[in-house]
Amino acid sequence: MADQSTGPVPPAGAGTATADPMALIDSRAGWPTVAATFVSTFTVFGVNYSFGAFFKPMADEFGSSRSSTALVFSITTFLYFLFGVATGRIADKIGPRKVLAVGAVAMVLGLLATSRVQSIEVGYVTYAIGVGIGVACAYVPMVAAVGGWFNTKRTNALGLAVAGIGVGTLIMAPLAERLIDAYGWRTTYVILAVGAGVLMTLALLGANPPPRPANAAPPPSILGVVRASRDFWVLYASMFLMTLVLFVPFVFMGDYLKQRDVAGTAGWLIGTIGICSVIGRLGFGVIARRWSLMGLYRGCYLVVGASFGLWIAAGSSYGLLLVYAVVLGVSYGGFIALSPAVAAIIFGPVGLGGILGLLYTGAGIGGLVGPPLMGALIDGLGYTPTLLIAAALGIGSGLVLLLLSPDTRAHRA
């Protein structure tokens, strides 16, 4: 299949190419890209969100604090959202396949290099750059491509596509724990590198650019769109506040269980967040067609914030921590699935990759600051006060969305 921004070659068996590429919108020709996005997000986020399993053994070997060890995850999060500005814009012009191929190579090399580091500081470079580029190339460009393939089916298609994040988290987090127990964290990174290379190569087969008219205008200026849209900055601020706290369980849950002497593994809790996020992604994609899209989006943010209260109430009860994981997972999956649809409604599908990339830098900054900040607060205050702060910030991220324009707040999918 040709990887050109002027439109895809119809899949084998579809007959001759249609004279109007836009007739392919909402057709079955877009579903291979949905499948490819599922596989690519399964891979890169499954690897990245399994970092909690590596947190304790890496900290023990290098003698690093919670805050400095969490920086590995934080810098990675910042870089993949920062690089997403470029990868989204490039994919708008040349299609997602070549961009995804670069991400596959970067992730494999980054994981292999991390398996050989002798200090946590070198790990900041190898892991953050390798995995950061991998996620940046596999997420924003692929999600934007799915958004361009669909109109009336967009929320459902996006929900299925990004469900890969949840399934990857479900499988990879407990798998990484088992592999580390059996082979050590260094060999586990080598195994993940090989698996990531295979899966991302498979994803390349379906990474088709969305159809565009032969005489389509170039994507609009990103900065022009941003300057003209107050709603952009509201979404930006909300994402920043949310990602200050979103990754706390992914990074610190294993440490929390050990400190509280809780019987149970962090891998299964993170995996529960992952599988429940799939339910959120699919479920909210369906009900968004019948309810206010922005109301659901805002509600997901508020519930994520409130879920930290469940974590506090759970204390040393593994069963209640599972309840927390379910609530967080469903609400987290909901806003991840709905955010590209919200952006497509406000800014339109043309040039969506570049817009999403710039919008997600707010999440990147929050992801950079949040885990080490929370680690420092845990070191200084303990878990309960830190989780109260996390709850307040999460709820605040939902309240910020009340500042969106009335037309946007009332929009349905």
Image: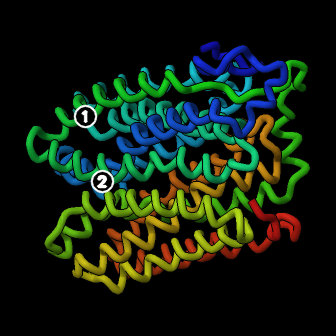
Q: Residue at x 58, y 42 (%)?
A: 81
Say which quarter of the image contains residue 86: top right
Measured from the top left, where is residue 337 in percent x and y?
59, 55
Circle nearer the N terminus (2, 1):
2
Q: Which residue is mark 1?
A: 189
Amino acid type at circle 2 is Gly
Q: Residue at x 28, y 83 (%)?
A: 315
Measured from the top left, where is residue 158 in percent x and y?
60, 48
Say which quarter of the image contains residue 317: bottom left
Measured from the top left, where is residue 218 in percent x and y?
86, 25
- Looking at the rendering, in which quadrant would you find the N terminus? top right
Q: Residue at x 74, y 49 (%)?
A: 152
Q: Is residue 213 left or right of residue 288?
A: right
Query: Is residue 350 shown above or below 305?
Result: above
Circle 1: is it few (<14), some (14-19), or many (20+) Cα within 10 Å? Answer: many
- Determine whether the residue tagged by mark 2 lies in a helix, strand or loop: helix
Measured from the top left, where is residue 78 in percent x and y?
53, 45
Closer-to-camera residue (133/163):
163
